[in-house]
Amino acid sequence: QVQLVESGGGLVQAGGSLKLSCVASGRSFSRSPMAWFRQAPGKEREFVATINWSGGSTTYADSVKGRFIISRDNAKNTVYLQMNSLKPEDTAVYYCAARSGYLSMPSDLRSVYDYWGQGTQVTVSS
């Protein structure tokens, strides 16, 4: 059974940092893009960041560009999201996503991803 398990969320003051981790089990995603999305209360789930299979190509939402860094460790089947200079508007549940089939490029499309984690809450206080 494939599982994606996020961790690292919590409560932080504005300007602070958090690092999220997402560990995949049940199969390898070393040949597929992985991504982070987030969903704030009353809003649609939105794209945050994506990374291609090798880690050599990344894409970010404009709202987090320059503050967040996505990375991955294929040996550990894990993707990370380093979040710096956090703002109250970053408050959301953060989900990691993985694609089952091979795709060379990263993708910001929800429809590309077949597996989703349960989410981890990030709350940024002002």
Image (tube, rainbow, N blue to C red):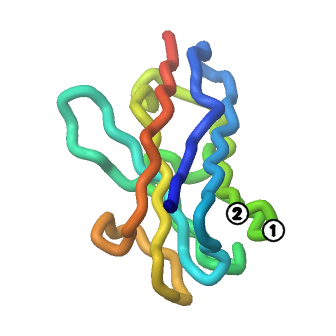
The percent coordinates of residue 83 (x first, y second) are 63, 39
Is residue 88 positioned above or below 92 on the image? above
Query: Which residue corresponds to the image point at 58% horizontal and 20% vertical from the top-left?
Result: 10
The percent coordinates of residue 7 (x first, y second) are 62, 35
Query: Which residue corresponds to the image point at 39% horizontal and 69% vertical from the top-left?
Result: 113
Is residue 90 positioned above or below 102 on the image? above
**Residue that lies at the very extreme toward the front in this rendered image:** 1
Query: Which residue corresponds to the image point at 56% horizontal and 45% vertical from the top-left?
Result: 5
Q: Characterize the local packing of mark 1: few (<14), some (14-19) or many (20 or more) Cα atoms within 10 angstroms.
A: few
Q: Name the residue under label 1.
A: 75
Can residue 116 be seen in this snapshot?
Answer: yes
Q: Looking at the picture, which amino acid does disc 2 mark?
A: Asn
Find numbered disc 1 in the image and state the secondary structure of the residue it sits on.
helix
Query: Which residue corresponds to the image point at 60% horizontal and 70% vertical from the top-left?
Result: 27
18 lies left or right of 6: right
Can residue 69 be seen in this snapshot?
Answer: no
Dot label at residue 77: 2
The percent coordinates of residue 102 (x first, y second) are 51, 88
Q: Characterize the local packing of mark 2: few (<14), some (14-19) or many (20 or more) Cα atoms within 10 angstroms.
A: some
Find numbered disc 2 in the image and state the secondary structure of the residue it sits on.
loop
Between residues 80 and 125, which one lies in front from this camera angle? 80
The alpha-carbon separation of the residues under discs 1 and 2 comes to 6 Å
31 lies left or right of 48: right
84 lies left or right of 75: left
The percent coordinates of residue 38 (x first, y second) are 39, 43
Q: Are marks 1 and 2 in contact (CB under 8 Å)?
A: yes
The quadrant holding residue 31 is: bottom right
